[in-house]
Image (tube, rainbow, N blue to C red):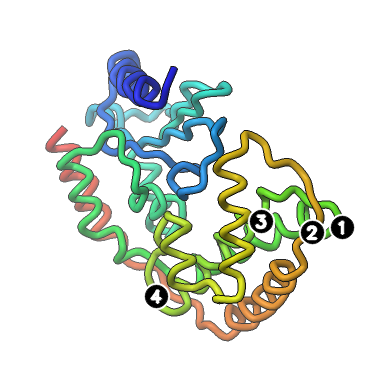
Amino acid sequence: MNEKEIIARIQEKLTEIEQKENIKILHCVESGSRSWGFASPDSDFDVRFIYIRKPEFYLSLEKTRDFIEWELNDVYDINGWDIQKALRLLHNSNPTIFEWNNSPIVYRTSPMWEKVREIINDYFLTRTGMNHYLSTAKHNYKEYLKGEEVRLKKYFYVLRPILACRWIMNRNCPPPMLFSDLTKAELDPKLEEPVNKLLELKMQTPEIGTGKRIDIINEYIDEQLVFLKDKLETMEKEEQKSWEKLDGLFLSLLKNN
């Protein structure tokens, strides 16, 4: 199947999920490398959605599942979160919620999600966001890019969170999903050429595999990890916002469902 056919199939699958699970999908996006703007020819489709059930579901004393894992194979990776789970995570400033909200590839959305969008950034905590992206960058760097031979595509899984940290540090708001937006705003000009060459290789090659470490990029990563760690340590811990807006929003969504 070509990409157009796959996207049409995704829409069919979303309708099937709604019918079989008796839910309403509020918002559904692409969340992986395709939404970051550097998908390989063989990248799968990372489909993520937030859904709501009928009001009586939330009144049950029995423990209920708050996520749906629908499909995982070479083409599709489809799963979703219940709106109650999503709003609880939003209260904790979970970065995933902001990423799904900011994805440039939207498969389905709704007026109900617009109500979430109106207040979502009120719950963004700068320190929490920076800590998440910095931890991601550190883990991927240590795991994949420290040897003489490295997994080349993993450079993007380190550079993107580093640039996201810098975006948060300079703007105090959730970073954009697109890697190109981040590089334009935050990447050191001396890295533009090696990063663009690597990006072109990744987008044209099904599996770029391993290669010699790119010293200029590693030096930049080492420098930024130290800088961002020091910056994070000087930031004051922010207080979580009140539950009041989220409680009111949740009730409003249930009444309109």
Q: Locate the N terminus by quadrant.
A: top left
Whichever of callouts 4 and 3 sits on the residue coming sooner in the sequence is 3
| Residue 63 visible somewhere in the drawing | no
Residue at numbered disc 4 = 172
Q: Amino acid at mark 4?
A: Asn
Residue in view at x 40 percent, y 42 percent: 85
Image location (x, y in percent) of residue 55: 22, 31
Relative depth, front residue between 154 and 227: 154
Mark 1 neighbour density, 10 Å: few (under 14) some (14–19) many (20 or more): few
Q: Are marks 2 and 1 in contact (CB under 8 Å)?
A: yes
Q: Amino acid at mark 1?
A: Glu
- Asked if residue 183 is positioned above or below residue 105 in the image, the reply reads below
Could you tell me the amino acid type at mark 2? Arg
- Residue 246, can we see it? yes
Front residue of this view, candidates 52 and 184: 184
Give residue 155's mark.
Answer: 3
**CA–CA distance in space, label 1 to label 4:** 36 Å
Q: Which residue corresponds to mark 2?
A: 213
Callout 2: SS: loop
How far apart are the alpha carbons under marks 2 and 1? 5 Å
Taking depth in this image into account, of 243 and 102 the one nearest to the observer is 102
Q: Quadrant of the C terminus?
A: top left
**Where is residue 134, by image quadrant?**
bottom right
Q: Earlier in the sequence, mark 3 or mark 1?
A: 1
* Amino acid type of the residue tagged 3 in the rendering: Tyr
Q: Is residue 149 left or right of residue 84?
A: right
Q: Which residue is mark 1?
A: 148
The mark that comes first in sequence, 2 or 1, is 1
Between disc 3 and disc 2, the foreground one is 2
Contact (Cβ within 8 Å) of mark 1 with mark 4: no
